[in-house]
Amino acid sequence: MGLTHIIDRRLNGKNKSAVNRERFLRRYRDHIKKAVSEAVGKRSITDIERGESISIPSKDLDEPIFRSGQGGVRETVNPGNKEFTTGDQVARPPGGQGGQGSGQGEASNSGEGMDEFVFQISQDEFLDFMFEDLELPNLIKKQLKDTTSFKYLRAGYANQGNPAKINIIRSLQKAYGRRIALTGKKRETIKELELKLLTLEASPENHTEEIKALKLSIDALKKRIKKIPWIDEFDLKFNQHIKHPVPSTSAVMFCLMDVSGSMSQMHKDIAKRFYILLYLFLKRNYKKIDVVFIRHHTSAKEVDEEEFFYSRETGGTIVSSALKLMDEIIKQRYPAADWNIYAAQASDGDNWNDDSPLCSKLLREGILPQVQYYSYIEITKLEHQSLWHEYEKLNADFPENFSIQNISDESEIYPVFRELFSRKGSHHE
Amino acid sequence: MNKQDDNNYISTGSEWSFELIEKYDEAIAKIAKEYNLDTYQNQIEIISSEQMLDAYSSVGMPLGYHHWSFGKQFLNSEQNYKRGQMGLAYEIVINSDPCIAYLMEENTMMMQALVVAHAAYGHNSFFKGNYLFKAWTDASAIIDYLLFAKNYISRCEERHGIDEVEKILDSCHALMNYGVDRYKRPVPISAEEESKRQKEREHYMQQQVNELWRTIPVNSDNDDEISKARFPDEPQENLLYFIEKNAPLLEPWQREVIRIVRKIAQYFYPQRQTQVMNEGWATFWHYTIMNTLYDRKLVDEGFIMEFLTSHTAVVYQPPFDSKWFSGINPYTLGFAMFQDLRRICEYPTDEDKQWFPDIAGSDWLITLDFAMRNFKDESFILQYLSPKVIRDLKLFSIKDDDQVQHYEITGIHNENSYRYVREQLSQQYNLSMKEPNIQVWDVDLRGDRSLTLRHIPHQRVPLADSTADVLKHVHRLWGFDVHLFSVDEGDKVAEYHCPPIEPEEPSE
């Protein structure tokens, strides 16, 4: 029977099933996509960044085999008899749909509670499904899509490398050291011999032979020292560089929101979800994202996130104040040459009527030429007002990077979001 | 206190280490040898719980081809495991030579020793000794064959696309239980030969199929006769084999994929037929070996108490009316039977002498070894289920006839019905009773090339609703119309067609 082998396999990687799992997701992608898009509609604001448990009706992923159905005569043996004796008549269990499962493993297992096949997908998978088919608008323009650029950073020295990277000082130091190390003994001997030679040469007549011999051996030693290579292959030192990813793609995202009295918390929640989606979406495409929150009623102010979403204000609405502030911030901190600028504006559509043309002008002349994308969502169930109509006109002039959408309740966020960012060519009526 | 003096415990804590596992293995191997257990060489692999989940979902194949259903299995076990609804099995053991047993790193020292005894000596000796495994599987070739299968299928995926291969595999899986010759002894599989002959075979098989489907009549005189004769002349139980050899439209690679699924089904077939025996045997031996370790003072009280706790949990049989009940626990039944068999040998009662005159009082090692080698669940129960086990488990048989208003109790643990209960239980483990009896009946060679299957109901039990879906898979493989008739003693009781047709059209 031989000796038992005991093998530690724990380091062998655990993802043997990864391919099969991926095959499963691939096969049921439609189910999963549907579940994901429902989840996005339902999830609370703070926890968009996690996986999701997906459930698929079991019957959809059934693997059918020939099985026996209900009916006919069946006789089974069971354990744990208490009071039965042979010949007893036992009433059928009431409503016994799942019936007498015994001896019929599958039948009893699928009887109850197993109507849904439930499993987890990771956050990454969740987001992948969520963003599937979407593409950042104008991304191609700057060739930014996920192209991580690299910078080479020095990272010490290496013994191997290409000739262009030879570090001369280090290599020569090494060669020098080697030469010293290899010739030390010989040079010592030469010194001794030369000393002897010197003493002998004081009276050369008596020691001609010896002097000759000494000179010969000194010469021989010197020759041997010369034979030691001045530089050898293993002296070579190369500068080592490692690839270091550079966050070449940075974006700034402006969140503009009307916080005047007419905006209820419900409006803000909807807006917030939209911003979250946008943020997550950008995060998948850019390494570094700054977020700027600008809120406004009659005047605009840059605030932090907390204040942006939760402080209450009252009063009228002048949208242009926010646009002016945004334009200033762009000029000061986020020059369009270095930054990809995205903006999302949310409002219930209220604006001081005379202000709307001004907004339009600010966008047309100042902001839109600089930004990658500007989206405006109007959260209202009512008639559109002047702001919407002004923006509609703008939309015609900037179809590439400006769009407006109307949201009337929470479940519409995601479809609208998709609509805003859907792949070019696949939309537009 | 003085007890401590004469002990030579291998270990006392619950932490395991590689040296300790090695020591336990040595001690267990020594005991196993004394009990004449003949095993393949052992290969014990320590894995993490994630890896155990992986192993689970590939139905115990150490390497399998890729398929979504394994992913589904994986997600399912992962979900159950995370929710705490399912503990992972302590072990998985592969019928291969060397015999591979997986130990989970989370196990305690006691668990590791238990698994070594259970899997590496219990299951292992069963794999090597039982006649079904000997006849149906070639332990030394399975790993290579699985590797061949995996590579072949991924090459097919490259060439024909994942979807195409997945379709064929789906259909094969649907018929996997009908991919074995139940009575004929199969040719053992060998990976090397498989891949060597695979090319030749592709060619040859295609030729055969072409021969069969030649449209020019050989001889017009006996044309009538040909059309009347059925093909195949005898009904065929191995649907996958029949399809692989005769389906008109399959490409060579598709036939090879069918063959792979068929061969793997065949490899697992003995396991499905010997669940009670195999688990019973392994449980019996871990129980015996662990107790021997304790008797020899190689393990301490804490160890044996921990062992008994988990052993008791493994062999627990909930009664039929418990909410935990899900059929007869094969560990319980198998363990009880082997334990009882030993008792009959060592301490026979008058009842035993009457029921088992040949084995009562015999050498238990020889008797158990014989039982292990020469039976499968069905025959093992028929041969060895004793009145005592029936009494202990309080077995009773119950009849459910849909034409009668009540269930009827047909036998309990009493003198009059021991034999009856035993026969009924034996039938319960007869695979051909559990699975509907479906065979290839006829192929319309000269007509529309349709394939006709016949189902012979047992005790009027009809086919389940899934039948129509399975027929779709048969249809995909066969490529032409498929008909299935349930024929009970000459009467057609049900029919299924793919693609579906109006019931009056088909003629017998």
Image (cartoon, helix red, strand yellow):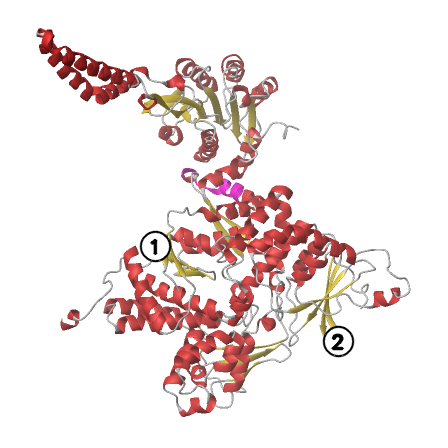
Check whether the beta carbons of the residues at disc 1 and disc 2 lie within 8 A of each other: no
Task: Kindly identify which residue carries mark 1.
Answer: B105
Q: Is residue B290 left or right of residue A62?
A: left
| Pointer 2 local density, CA inside 10 Å: few below 14, some 14–19, many at least 20 | few
Badge 1 marks a residue whose secondary structure is loop
* x, y percent for residue A176: 25, 17
> Is residue A37 magenta-colored?
yes
Task: Kindly identify which residue carries mark 2.
Answer: B490
| Pointer 1 local density, CA inside 10 Å: few below 14, some 14–19, many at least 20 | many
Quarter holding residue B360: bottom left
Badge 2 marks a residue whose secondary structure is loop
Q: In percent of the image, x 14 and y 15: which residue is there?
A: A193
Closer mark to the observer between disc 1 and disc 2:
1
Q: Is residue B16 visible?
A: no
| Residue extent of the magenta highlight | A35-46
Q: Which quadrant is home to the N terminus of chain A?
A: bottom left
